[in-house]
Amino acid sequence: MRNILLSVFILVLGLETKAQNKIDDKILLVLDIQKLFTSTTISDSSAMSLIDNSNSIISKFNPNNVIYIQSIARVLNVSLKGFRVDTLPDLELDPRLNVVNNNIFTKNKGNAFTSEELNSFVEKSSIKEIIVIGLLAENCVKETLLGGKKKGYTMYYIPEAIAAKNKESKTNTEAKFRKSGIIEMSISQIVNLK
C-alpha cells in the first residue's frame, strides 16, 4: 500500500511539474496595448475585455518571460516652414495593463521582430515558443505572428486577448493564422495551468 501511495504522489508531482513547464517554456508578447490605441481604435467594452483577459494571462507567467511591445507612431507635419517628422503623444502602455517588469521594447513597423532589442532578448532566453496577445489582429498581431514563424519560433495566439477592428475581420484573420501554422490557445488553457 505504501508503494502505491508513493507512486501516486510521484505521478501527481510529475504532472504538476509538466503543467508548469508548459507555460514556463514560453514567452508572452504583449503587443501594442497602449493608451492611444485602446481609447481610439477599439470600443471601450472591447478595450476593457482585452485588458482584463491580458491581465489574467500575464498573472500566470513568470514575469521574466513577459515582454511588452510599444508601437512608435510618427507623422509627417507639413507647414510653411517645411517638413517635420513628429512622434505621436500618449504612446505609453495603457495604465490598466498589469506591467510586471521592465521588458518594454519599441517597434516602428507592424512586425515586432523588426526590433533588434526584442530579437536579442528572445535569443538570450533560448525559448522557442511565443504567445502573442494585443491588438490589432489584422495588422500588428498578424505581422508579428508571421514574423516569428519565419524566424523559426512556434507561435501561438489567444483569441480572447486579441482585439480587431470588428468581429468579421477577426474571424477572417484567425483563419489565416491557422492556415499559416499559428497555434490557437484558449485563455482557459493558460489560466488553469497554475
Image: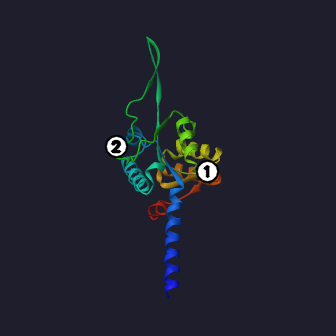
Q: Is any part of residue 161 visible from this angle?
A: yes
* Numbered tag placed on residue 68 in the rendering: none
* Numbered tag placed on residue 176 in the rendering: 1
In front of the other: 171 or 25: 25
Q: Is residue 50 left or right of residue 1?
A: left
How many residues crowd around disc 1 within 10 Å: few (fewer than 14), some, or many (20 or more)?
some
Residue kind at label 1, given as amino acid type: Lys
- In the rendered image, the vertical position of residue 9 relative to residue 32, given as above or below: below
**Which mark is nearer the camera, 1 or 2?**
2
Q: Position of residue 16 (x, y in %)?
A: 49, 68
- Considering the numbered disc 1 on the image, is that residue within a helix, a strand or a loop? helix
Q: Position of residue 86 (x, y in %)?
A: 44, 23
Residue at 51% from the left image edge and 55% from the top image edge = 158
Q: Position of residue 47 (x, y in %)?
A: 39, 48
In front of the other: 139 or 90: 90
Number of marks in the image?
2
Residue at 34% from the left image edge and 43% from the top image edge = 95
Marked residue nearer the N-terminal end (1 or 2)? 2
In front of the other: 121 or 99: 121
**Residue wearing tag 2:** 95
Residue at 62% from the left image edge and 49% from the top image edge = 153
Residue farthest toward the bottom in the current orientation of the protein: 1
Q: Position of residue 140 (x, y in %)?
A: 53, 41
Q: Is any part of residue 111 visible from this angle?
A: no
